[in-house]
Image (cartoon, grey):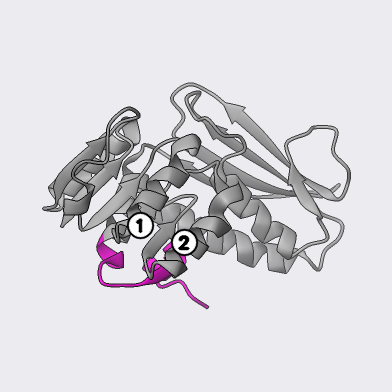
Amino acid sequence: MKIALLGYGKMGKVIERIALERGHEIVLRKGSSDSFEGLSNADVAIDFSVPSAAVGHISECLNRNVPIVSGTTGWLNDYDQMVNLCNEKNGSFIYGSNFSLGVNLFFELNDYLAKMMSKFDQYSVSMEEIHHTQKLDAPSGTAISLAKDIIKNSDYSNWTIDENHSEKELFIDAKRIENVPGTHSVFYNSTVDTIEIKHTAHNRDGFALGSVIAAEWILGKKGVFTMRDVLDLGK
């Protein structure tokens, strides 16, 4: 499989290593100032860039009929626009706030727990996410995905990172600490106890492997997908 890497920072280099280990070829390594030369030769593109570049990368791929897997977060105000473009071009598109197998299982656990806890109003919910200091968005896309599943199963109206939040707002404590790949915790607190679920990434390999698996999976498929489709986690 010929892969175009859109974004060639730390994640891009890990994706490259894992893709090569799995027998694939890299035909484009696009940094911030590079052109799209070589994209048309790709079977699939993997985008781990920056929020300001993601929409341009995804659009370029869909317009050129190149399947695109995007793990860049912080640009989701334009997500519906990209979905419409994919459908218009009969393209192939996967967005994931996190491609790690463990995190996607954690998403399922969080959703299940939120449904269980919705019956017990003595518990309040809060979240914490910790990432490296180079991460550009806060809270993380993963934290937002977790929060959305809690909100849909509860009386919370929205999430916030403001410590002076109302009772109807789900608080996410977003911390930036050097050399932390990603840690996400969900707390259910009452006056007598706390229930906590937590996922801790040890390195970037899990994110990279998941994105390559998604790229392998999307070949020959048309439409807009998520990692739930890739991992066959449908209910």
Are the residues flagged by discs 2 and 1 in contact, CB closer than 8 Å? Answer: yes
Say which mark, if any, is on residue 149: none
Residue located 50% across and 23% down the image = 133
As helix, strand or loop, the secondary structure at mark 2 comes to helix
Magenta stretch encompasses residue 231: yes
Residue located 25% across and 35% down the image = 13
User: Which one is earlier in the sequence, the residue at label 2 or at label 1?
Assistant: 1
Residue located 75% across and 63% down the image = 117
Q: Amino acid at mark 2?
A: Leu
The residue segment tinted magenta is 216-235
Judged left or right of residue 155, residue 178 is left
Q: Amino acid at mark 1?
A: Asn
To which residue does mark 1 refer?
A: 63
Q: Quadrant of residue 62?
A: bottom left
Q: Quadrant of residue 14?
A: top left
To which residue does mark 2 refer?
A: 85
